[in-house]
Image: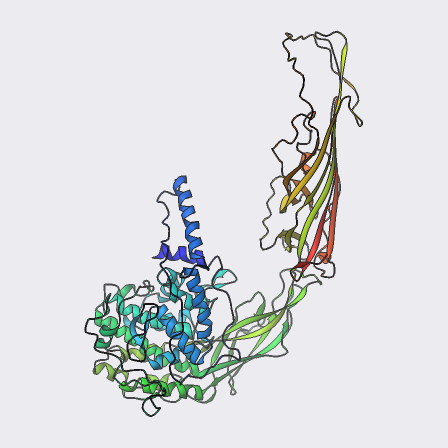
Amino acid sequence: MKLTAIVVAATLLLTGCIFNSGDEPGDAAVDTRLYLGPIPEPAPLPALGAQPEAPTPPTDVNDQAAMEEYIAAVEEYAAQMQNLDQPGSPAAFQKAVVTLGETAQRGGAQAVAAWQSLLVASGIAVAGHDGAPITVNGSVGSGWPVTDAELRILALMGTSNDGMLLVDLADVLEGIPELAGRDVAEDLYDDLLNFSGADLGFDAFMHALNPSYLVRDMEMIPIDEVALTWGQIGLVLRRLSAELLTVTGAVTAEPAANAGVRMQPAAFTTASTSAADKQACAIETGSPWTDELLKAVTKAHSVGFDSVLDPYITKISTKVGMAAARLVLAFLAVVVKAFALEADFSMSDSPLVRTKRTQPGEVRDLTIDFEFNSGRWSEIAGCLNLFLGFAGFELPAAPRGPAVDISVDLASTRPGLLRVGDGQGGGTPVNQATTNSSGEAKFKLSGAPQADIIPEQAEPDLKTVTLRAESNLENNDLFKDIMSLPWAALDAVGTFGLSLVPTMLSRVRILSHSGTVDVRDWKLDADFEVTAVGAMTLHDGRNVQLSGGCTPGTTIISTSDHAEVSFASDPVTVSALLLSNPQGNVGDQAVVFTPMGEDFYPMDQGHGVRMFELPVVYSADKSHAEPGVSPMPPLYKVPPSNACGDGGGATNEPPPPDCGVRTYSGTLEVTIPMRRTLHVGGEPITESVWKHCGSPLNFGEPPVAMHLEGCTSPDRSGGAFPSIADVFDTSKTRLEVSGELTCTSEYPGSQSLVVYTWTLTFCRIVEDKPAC
């Protein structure tokens, strides 16, 4: 399973084709009230088709043929996984889940409809109007079906960005006897990272609820910083409960044949049923977690939390597994009292302006108001009291007003942009505070210093930074009243597992609240359409005198080959990047240009550090002259020779010359041959374009744009990089860089000359169009 998961994750996540950041819940369109209206029909959700089988790597990675076959199979597999246009493909299915997941976070009836379908797609059974599990695309999910009350509360939980750190949730789960003493956090982290191999629906829904909960800025988030929203916590615990029933054999591949036991219809009001007959959240039977109900309506599902549940797999009795599953669901039902504690983040004088220098930026005051929302809890408790009526007790009301004496730890999710504290240091922790009599926790915020000086031409860039406050409930009695209820009495009447609810609640010490603040940062965006033109004159002259040998007297050989070349490139789009000195010299910066969307890799392949390439078309006109035409080298007299051939030389007439104009295509390389300069050279072309036109040109034939290393003593001018100020000055829409190279090569009786000029034109792109 893990191998498949890794391949799936690499294919769907690292390519960035599915999980985008999207809008988070919490805006004005989100309904944060408990929905108490009629339960709507499940929202439409396209089905997931048959998944392609992930290729298996060869046992011998040194087998080149096998590895090539494997790589080809991976590419084909990735293409199938990523095909958004193919209905039922993993990519199309996950995109649909993510889209519906956005609806699930908006609250109200639409969220309830979305949660039904997404829960089933995540492998979790949901009770329908008739009490039997609903069917979505042929699947009914697994575990005890989610009841009317639980569905409404899960939909409410999905509207919140608050929740718990993964490590704190794991600590709560360690309150289950079979998980005590284990590192549940590591197991949970590992399972969530690899869940796509077990269930794409669950994995996609988790990312829809919080797209960046495992990855931030293209890097994996450390385990102790992973925060789960309340919606994710509900999804995890619901799935975990269902898997507990699977791994301990409480459910099998198919439901029992005598499916006569049904949960009574979820209570909702329709035109044919009055509010007096039915009441939202109520069920008309006893416990919704009975053995009979489970065996009648559900079946086993795949296991994704295999690391967390390892102690249960084939090692724990069905009865113990069912007790643990009940415990998880009961804990989930009452832990939502944490919703009663709300946190409101407010920053003075928004936005905070980040510096352009290497010192901390502006400082702002942040106030977090913690308050108990008794009205919200009253709605939830009223719903749960109807749902938990079988238990024979009522959940108490929540405290009112400010939350006093709560310890709060504050962290910025983007410390490279915004930091907690004023940046001046000091003897007290800047990220810790305790709520005062008004429920306020106060902090200082400051803009993070830049790693290097930002040019004045930088444009403002408004960014939103999420702050996460961890509130410690150790000195608060939020759950004390619930813990004091007679949970143990329920075990005495056969609802095993619930006596440990107080133990798990006692381990809920840290709640996570999030808020956002605006920061004005600076951006250096400069994209250009680049073209190159150039011209070269090449001239080779030979002037030698031969004497001696078989022919009396002297022979003078005087020839020359001449070429006039011009070229023009097709345009390419590049981005300017500002680089800092690798030795840390602040302010010593340089600009480079790279193909748009690509990173810069400073590799010197002999021509200098290559930045980008341009497709080019050359036009060359070559001529041959006998005797040679100027410029010619001085006559070189070859020392006499007494050697004489055998007279067997060829007597055929030479073929007619084919000199003249030729056009041919090639590639230009724009390189950095030395500090703060650039050069345009051409890649060699091996195809011959003249077959009978004198001798091949000394500097290469067919001629291409001259590289510097082709000349031993170049006479070079121009080629200076545009200034940093000009590159990032948006008012300058056209930049030009020109260069000239003269190169000579001389030997006795032979002389070669090249004069090469080139011009690069950078046309700034404004609103996706060249502005020149």
Q: Nearer the viewer, residue 666 or 167?
A: 666
Vertical side of 167 occupied by 713: above or below: above
Vertical side of 712 occupied by 66: above or below: below
Residue at screen point 57% across, 69% down: 419
Q: Nearer the viewer, residue 663 or 707?
A: 663
The answer to whether 450 appears left or right of 372 in the picture is: right
The picture quadrant where one finds residue 651 is top right
Q: Residue furthest left?
A: 258
- The percent position of residue 348, horizontal first and vertical second, equals 61, 79
- The percent position of residue 566, horizontal first and vertical second, equals 72, 39
The picture quadrant where one finds residue 134 is bottom left
Vertical side of 763 occupied by 666: above or below: above
| The N terminus: image quadrant | bottom left
The answer to whether 8 appears left or right of 25 in the picture is: left
Q: Residue furthest bottom?
A: 276
The answer to whether 605 appears left or right of 747 in the picture is: left
| The C terminus: image quadrant | bottom right
Residue 505: in sight, yes or no?
Answer: no
Q: Nearer the viewer, residue 585 or 153?
A: 153
- The percent position of residue 149, horizontal first and vertical second, equals 35, 82
Residue 68: in sight, yes or no?
Answer: yes
The picture quadrant where one finds residue 704 is top right
Residue at screen point 57% across, 65% down: 416
- The percent position of residue 193, horizontal first and vertical second, equals 40, 62
